[in-house]
Image (cartoon, helix red, strand yellow):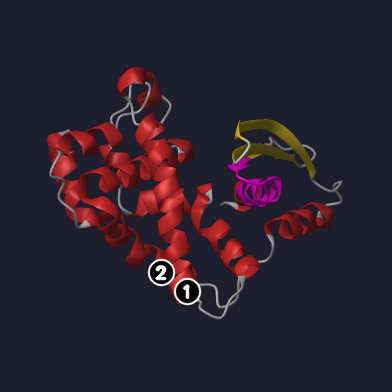
Amino acid sequence: MSGQLEALQERIGYRFHDAGLLKLALTHPSVAKAQSNQRLEFLGDAILGAVVARLLYDLYPQEQEGELARRHAALVRGETLTQAARDIGLGEALHIGASETQAQGRSNASNLEDALEALAGALYLDGGLAAVEAFIAPRWTRLAQQAETPPKDAKTALQEWAQARGLPVPAYRLAASTGLAHAPEFTLEVTVQGFPPAHAKASSKRAAEQLAAAELLGKLTEG
């Protein structure tokens, strides 16, 4: 695995001071759940979201909150993170168990998305915000600039996708509500008839609905 770690660091243009952090970021729960990348994934999800938000804030000074939010949702959704992971060959460096290997776990979209978030968390712990920004900036700036105008509102786009196929409008359900009163976290589920649901978490129900819609739309249209 050491050779894969070296090669990955070359591809991302960053050398870890603590190689253990990188190794942990690439360790799937199928290897050792207690010592896997899940905690780094939690941290990296928040860090990546914040860095992308700042990137968009600087790139589009004339756009308002709603427009920036739509761009942000498109850039942090699972499909985008999975593609970014594939672009840097993250799957090749994953440390996965035998069962995951047999199930083609190195190319599994969920595994790649989780590992990309964990990598962002590891970069933050090893090199601070500057290391994450250096990794994110060139890749996500290119992705952001591919869309001249903000992407369509995710809920609207999902509804149009369903209606174009003669399906009922998407159904949203509050799956969980956690956190303190001043810092709530809502988990929303969205379902389109005949397809598996998607879930997303955010500090408001409205934001969670948008993220869930973007996630489901990405799954429905990928490939």
Judge by depth and name the residue closer to the eye, 82 or 122: 122
User: Which x, y percent locates residue 177?
Assistant: 66, 32
Residue that carries the numbered disc 1 in the rendered image: 145
Q: How many labels does the image show?
A: 2
In contact (CB < 8 Å): disc 1 and disc 2: yes
Question: Amino acid under label 2?
Answer: Thr
What crowding class fits label 1: few (fewer than 14 Cα within 10 Å), some (14-19), or many (20 or more)? Answer: few
Secondary structure under the numbered disc 2 in the rendered image: helix
Which stretch appears magenta?
200-217
Residue that carries the numbered disc 2 in the rendered image: 141
Question: Amino acid under label 1?
Answer: Gln
What crowding class fits label 2: few (fewer than 14 Cα within 10 Å), some (14-19), or many (20 or more)? Answer: some
User: Which x, y percent locates residue 128?
Assistant: 25, 51
Depicted 9 relative to depicted 67: above or below: above
Secondary structure under the numbered disc 1 in the rendered image: helix
Check the image and name the residue furthest to the front.
182
- Residue 174, picture quadrant: top right
Depicted 156 relative to depicted 200: above or below: below
Residue occupying image coordinates x 62% and y 49%: 211
User: Which x, y percent locates residue 27?
Assistant: 30, 29
User: Which x, y percent locates residue 220?
Assistant: 65, 48
Q: Is the magenta stretch mostly helix, strand or loop?
A: helix
Is 164 magenta? The answer is no
The circle on residue 69 is none
